[in-house]
Every structure is written in structure tokens, then in C-alpha cells.
Image (cartoon, rainbow, N blue to C red):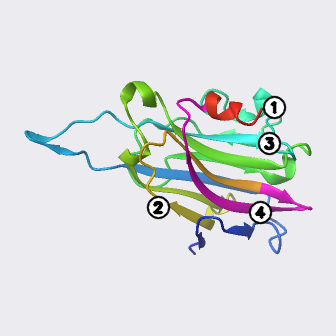
């Protein structure tokens, strides 16, 4: 069964009416855009290495501890409630390119948002941006049975941007919701993006 397709700015309940939902998988996917055709045929372009990360933010939207940045070089937060699947260097192939496992019930009480972002590794040196990526999406799946709950296709033109703020899981009272954000940003490295929230 396919999940609900969201549009930019839309919010949806995850746990309300789904009391047993605790473990979710945040799946992110993308494909390299077709390389430009030059005078002598197809130009070879370097793989665009997109990196998904999760920033675990406080109620006022702050990253209070650097261990609350879960990414390819810090694969889990201290209590393992948010765990990164590992780095995918190309984005080729079907399905999710990177996944972040989230145990909603185990997330520390001082964390109110799990902001999911993607940035391009070494974007400045490689002269790459999100105009070189197509079919980008973020989706939330129930880890029990891998059923898709929601999906958000990032269809805007992100040419010139080196980071994407895809969406966020956030607390709403005792429940968790998901918001589809889909904003482009300029951040050559995940640490630069994280600095915005300190």
C-alpha cells in the first residue's frame, strides 16, 4: 500500500491514530540528472555524492549538542534512537539511497524536532549543485513491515543550491507529526548547515 503523497508545506500526523507506531525509517532517494551533451558527445561528470543527515533540535530549534547531528561521520545519537544507514556515493539505482532509522518513543525528551537534510559532499571543489540531481524524495516508512506512510517528492528547481532541507519529524503534544519543507540552502558541508542551529 502506497503512503500519502505530500506537497511542500503540508503537515501530517504520524502517531495519532497509529498508536503502535514507534520505529520509522526516513528514506531519501535521488538520481543523477542526465549529463549535458557537449560538442563531442556526452560530457562525463563526477558522481554527485549526496549525504543525508538528521539534526536533533530542541524546542526552540537549537542543536544543543554536536552529538545530536546524525550523519555519515556520526552514525547515531548517544541513546541510538536515531541511526544513519551509511553513505551512498552515487545515488544510482532504485529505492532509497540513504536511510535514517528513528525510534520515536526513545528520542530524548529535550529533542522536539528531527530535521532531515541532504547536502552534496565536496560541492564547491566539484562545482556541483542540486540542479544535477533529479527524482529527489523523502519518505517515512513504518519499520515494522516497511510500509510507506508518507512521501514528499522534491520537485522544485534547486539549481545553485548545495543543500536541501527536506522535512522534519516534530513533537505535537504526545504525538509526532511530519512536515514537508523542501527548501534549498547554501552549505558546502553538513557542519556549515548545522551551525545555523547553534
Q: Nearer the viewer, residue 158 or 23?
A: 158
Magenta stretch holds residue 31: no
Residue range highlighted in magenta: 170-190
Left or right for 131, reference 137 = left
Q: Answer yes or no: do the residues labelled 4 and 3 have beta carbons within 8 Å? A: no
Q: Residue at x 58, y 69 (%)?
A: 7
Distance of label 2 from label 4 (alpha carbons): 22 Å
Disc 1 to disc 3: CB gap under 8 Å: no
Which residue in the protein does label 2 denote? 155
Q: CA distance from mark 2 to mark 3?
A: 26 Å
Give residue 149's position: percent from left, percent from top. 65, 68
Crowding at mark 1 (Cα within 10 Å: few <14, some 14-19, many 20+) = few
Mark 1 or 2, nearer chain start? 1
Q: Is residue 195 above or below residue 151?
A: above
Quarter of the view holding residue 44: top left
Which element is circle 3 on? strand
Whether residue 76 is visible, yes or no, is no
Q: Which residue is mark 3?
A: 57
Asked if residue 176 is among those painted magenta in the image, a careful observer would answer yes
Amino acid at each position: 500500500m502506497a503512503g500519502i503523497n505530500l506537497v511542500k508545506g503540508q503537515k501530517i500526523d504520524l502517531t495519532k491514530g497509529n498508536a503502535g507506531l514507534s520505529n520509522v525509517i526516513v528514506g531519501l532517494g535521488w538520481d543523477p540528472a542526465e549529463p549535458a551533451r557537449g560538442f563531442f558527445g556526452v560530457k562525463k561528470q563526477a558522481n554527485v555524492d549526496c549525504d543525508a543527515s538528521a539534526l536533533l533540535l530542541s524546542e526552540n530549534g537549537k542543536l544543543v549538542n554536536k552529538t545530536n547531528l546524525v550523519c555519515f561521520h556520526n552514525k547515531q545519537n548517544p541513546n541510538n534512537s536515531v541511526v544513519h544507514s551509511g553513505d551512498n556515493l552515487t545515488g544510482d539505482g532504485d529505492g532509497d539511497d540513504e536511510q535514517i532509522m528513528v525510534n520515536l518513543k526513545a528520542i530524548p525528551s529535550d529533542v522536539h524536532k528531527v530535521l532531515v537534510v541532504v547536502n552534496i559532499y565536496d560541492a564547491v571543489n566539484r562545482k556541483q549543485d542540486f540542479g544535477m540531481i533529479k527524482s529527489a524524495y523523502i519518505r517515512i516508512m513504518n519499520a515494522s513491515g516497511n510500509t510507506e506512510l508518507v512521501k514528499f517528492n522534491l520537485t522544485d528547481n534547486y539549481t545553485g543550491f548545495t543543500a536541501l532541507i527536506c522535512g522534519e519529524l516534530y513533537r505535537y503534544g504526545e504525538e509526532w507529526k511530519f512536515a514537508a519543507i523542501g527548501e534549498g540552502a547554501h552549505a558546502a558541508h553538513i557542519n556549515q548547515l548545522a551551525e545555523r542551529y547553534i
